[in-house]
Image (cartoon, rainbow, N blue to C red):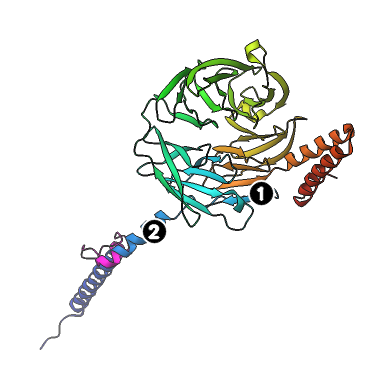
């Protein structure tokens, strides 16, 4: 029997070995491909293309929804003069108003609520508030009635006024009830401000075109004012309830008197006087508590303080008392607030606040980046001891140290001219109180 030749055996062996290598490589390639498909497969899908178990998928969806619903981080701010921060709203606050009796602060936000805060809690650790829900809408502006038994709001989507009555409960809280019917829609442009006269005789609404409406409390329009200012930037009722004023594109502030008869019946709206002196558009203005002073800030980069205690019917014009520089006003819109005694002017630009002494025209305090958004409202409380601002989901309250310093300066000046002992004692007592307040705030100048 003849054995096969060696070259033939070697050829068969090489052929078998090559086939084995090819098979091994094919298996390895298929395994790698399956790994890549598995790693690149969308979450929630198995290798056979069917979805994962529904319970697992719903858990992941809930986790993703929870992440989306997490509130944005609250803006943090600290300062030695920060008295308190009110933080119950879940949306950005657009407006606030102190009640005439000084007991409450109302705030409205885009979270569809109005909150009523007790001012006596401001310097406590906890800040209580009562909530009024704005159904199917949210309020952009809020104002207390003079008797503090109701408040009005401007509805963002409804473009009208709604009245809420406040009914006191036995436990000391309040129940808030919206009146059955809102005011009729009359404005053709966005409303920029609302107000109620302290006499309770009329309501004012102003829109961004050139329109100001004077209403009675039943929702009837008494008068329409055309400001002829190209556009309205701000409008307000004076604390004495005699006047309505507006500012806008023109470099002046126009003031009208709302006239009523002896029996309380509406008569007419007549032009009273103007604040003339700015060289560019006026951003904002404010009255002092007695309506004898007004302050304005303009795009010309200045603020001005005016004496408006004039007999305008005898053609007497307001007096310019002070002009100060505020360069930020030349580039961005600004807001201002005047302390009740007109001694301190607060100016807000962006998210910062600047406090000026109106007697000397000097800047005394500056609070940078107070809110996470631009400041939407600025107001002193009725005592003038606190300044409130809002712009994000919080209201921040500041001690008015420039106000205490102004009292110190005024009392020291009056003491030098005091003629009798009783007057000197009274002035000295006020001086000591102001100095002690500054000392407690660490703001007493040596």
Q: Quadrant of residue 139?
A: top left
For the residue pair 22 and 139, the one nearer the viewer reads as: 139
Can the viewer see residue 29? no
Q: Residue at x 48, y 51 (%)?
A: 130
Specify the segment rendered in magenta: 35-57
Considering every residue shown, the one lying at the far bottom of the view is 1
> Relative to residue 73, is residue 357 drawn left or right?
right
User: Tag 2's secondary structure?
Assistant: helix
For the residue pair 54 and 232, the one nearer the viewer reads as: 232
Q: Position of residue 108 (x, y in %)?
A: 48, 43
> Relative to residue 430, is residue 242 drawn left or right?
left
Q: Residue at x 85, y 39 (%)?
A: 422
| N-terminal-most mark, 2 or 1 | 2
Q: Residue at x 44, y 27 (%)?
A: 216
Q: Which residue is mark 2?
A: 66
- Mark 2: few/some/many CA within 10 Å (<14, 14-19, 20+): few
Can the viewer see residue 127? yes
- Mark 1: few/some/many CA within 10 Å (<14, 14-19, 20+): some
Relative to 139, residue 44 above or below: below
Considering every residue shown, the one lying at the far front of the view is 263
Q: Nearer the viewer, mark 2 or mark 1?
A: 1
Q: Which residue is mark 1?
A: 82
Which quadrant holds the N terminus? bottom left
Question: Rounded to the nearest whole Å, what is the CA distance between mark 2 and mark 1?
Answer: 34 Å
User: Tag 1's secondary structure?
Assistant: strand
Q: Position of residue 433 (x, y in %)?
A: 78, 46
């Amino acid at each position: 029997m003849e054995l096969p030749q060696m070259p033939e055996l070697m050829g068969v062996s090489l052929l078998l070995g090559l086939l084995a290598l090819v098979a091994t490589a094919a298996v390895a390639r298929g395994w790698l491909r399956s790994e890549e498909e598995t790693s690149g497969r969308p979450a929630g899908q198995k290798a056979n293309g069917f979805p994962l178990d529904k319970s697992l998928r719903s858990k992941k969806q809930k986790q993703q929804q929870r992440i989306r619903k997490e509130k944005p981080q609250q803006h943090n701010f600290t300062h030695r003069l920060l008295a308190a921060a009110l933080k119950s709203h879940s949306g950005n606050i657009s407006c606030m108003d102190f009640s005439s009796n000084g007991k409450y602060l109302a705030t409205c936000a885009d979270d569809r609520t109005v909150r009523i805060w007790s001012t006596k809690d401001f310097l406590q650790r906890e800040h209580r508030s009562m909530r009024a829900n704005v159904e199917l809408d949210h309020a952009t502006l809020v104002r207390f009635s003079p008797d503090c038994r109701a408040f009005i709001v401007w509805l963002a989507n409804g473009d009208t006024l709604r009245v809420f009555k406040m009914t006191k409960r036995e436990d000391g809280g309040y129940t808030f009830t919206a009146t059955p019917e809102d005011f009729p829609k009359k404005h053709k442009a966005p409303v920029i401000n609302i107000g109620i006269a302290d006499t309770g005789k009329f309501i004012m609404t102003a829109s961004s075109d050139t329109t100001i409406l004077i209403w009675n409390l039943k929702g009837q329009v008494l008068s329409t004012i055309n400001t002829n200012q190209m556009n309205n930037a701000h409008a307000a009722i004076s604390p004495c309830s005699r006047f309505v004023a507006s500012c806008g594109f023109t470099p002046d502030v126009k003031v009208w008197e709302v006239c009523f008869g002896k029996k309380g019946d509406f008569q007419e709206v007549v032009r009273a006087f103007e604040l003339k002196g700015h060289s560019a558009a006026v951003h904002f203005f404010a009255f002092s508590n007695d309506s004898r002073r007004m302050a304005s800030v303009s795009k010309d980069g200045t603020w001005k303080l005016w004496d408006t205690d004039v007999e305008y019917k005898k053609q007497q014009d307001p007096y310019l008392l002070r002009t100060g520089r505020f360069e930020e006003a030349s580039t961005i819109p600004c807001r201002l607030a005047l302390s009740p005694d007109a001694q301190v002017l607060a100016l807000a630009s962006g998210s910062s606040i600047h406090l000026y002494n109106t007697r000397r025209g000097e800047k005394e305090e500056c609070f940078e980046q107070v809110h996470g958004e631009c400041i939407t409202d600025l107001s002193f409380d009725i005592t003038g001891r606190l300044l409130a601002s809002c712009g994000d989901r919080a209201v921040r309250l500041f001690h008015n140290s420039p106000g205490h310093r102004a009292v110190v300066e005024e009392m020291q000046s009056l003491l030098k001219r005091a003629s009798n002992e009783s007057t000197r004692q009274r002035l000295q007592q006020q001086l000591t109180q102001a100095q002690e307040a500054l000392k407690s705030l660490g703001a007493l100048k040596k």
